[in-house]
Amino acid sequence: MHLPDFIWLWRSAAWSMGLALVAYSILAVSGGGILYTRVKEQPRPLWLRPLHYGMGIILVSLVLFLLEIGLVGTWGHFGSLGHSWHLLAGLSVVLLVIASAITASQITPQRPLLRQMHRGINLVLFLGFLWVLATGWIVVQKYLPA
């Protein structure tokens, strides 16, 4: 595949990654709010759950977009994939985000274990984002002009 200039692709990836981290942060805060109201047995604000679900949908969309950018950009620039640990890190984050979304959609009062799994997956996802950031920085250095 021949794409004339990859800088627009890397800018899209940078913005998308930044927005994904913002979405993840909002999810952490709103999820903490949901947990707080549950533990304290207080009424939950009506906007909190829809915000949490909406941010989850946005995070899934951004991560899938980042996957597409990474695959197209790497394939277009190198002609193949797997040039660094960034591919494995990115695929791990994609799988964790999807697992988080699946567990979130299955949480019910009859399945309390899924709520714990959802929280655990999201804690591991934090480490996944750190791994993607570290390996992504190394990849970006390959594309920046000297």
Image (tube, rainbow, N blue to C red):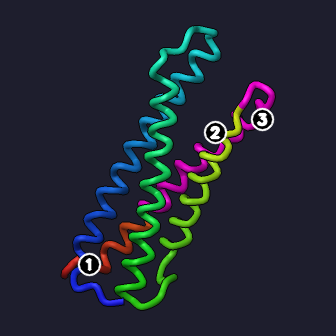
Task: Locate residue 73: give its quadrant.
Answer: bottom left
- The chief SS type of the magenta part is helix
Residue 34 drawn above or below residue 11? above
Camera-side residue of 9 and 14: 9
Residue 79 rendering spot, x and y as whole percentages: 42, 91
Q: Is residue 121 magenta?
A: yes
Q: Position of residue 20 (x, y in %)?
A: 40, 50
| Gap between marks 1 and 3 measured at Cα | 44 Å
In this rendering, would 56 be left or right of 8? right
**Residue type beneath disc 3:** Leu
Q: Nearer the viewer, residue 59 or 24?
A: 59
- Mark toward the start of the polypeptide (3 vs 2): 2
Does the stretch in magenta take in 63? no
Name the residue at 57% across, 18% down: 36
Q: Seen in the image, is 103 located left or right of residue 4?
A: right
Q: Is residue 135 above or below residue 113?
A: below
Q: Which residue is mark 2?
A: 104
Quick one: label 2, few (<14), some, or many (20+) residues within 10 Å?
Answer: some
Q: Residue at x 22, y 85 (%)?
A: 4
Q: Amino acid at mark 2?
A: Ala
Three-letter amino acid code at disc 1?
Phe
Query: Dot 3, crowdedness within 10 Å: few (<14), some or many (≥20)?
Result: few
93 to 104, vertically: above or below: below
Image: magenta residue range:
108-133
N-terminal label among 1 and 3: 1
Q: Which residue is mark 3?
A: 113
Labels 2 and 1 touching (C-beta < 8 A)? no
Q: From mark 2 to mark 1, how far is it between C-alphas? A: 36 Å
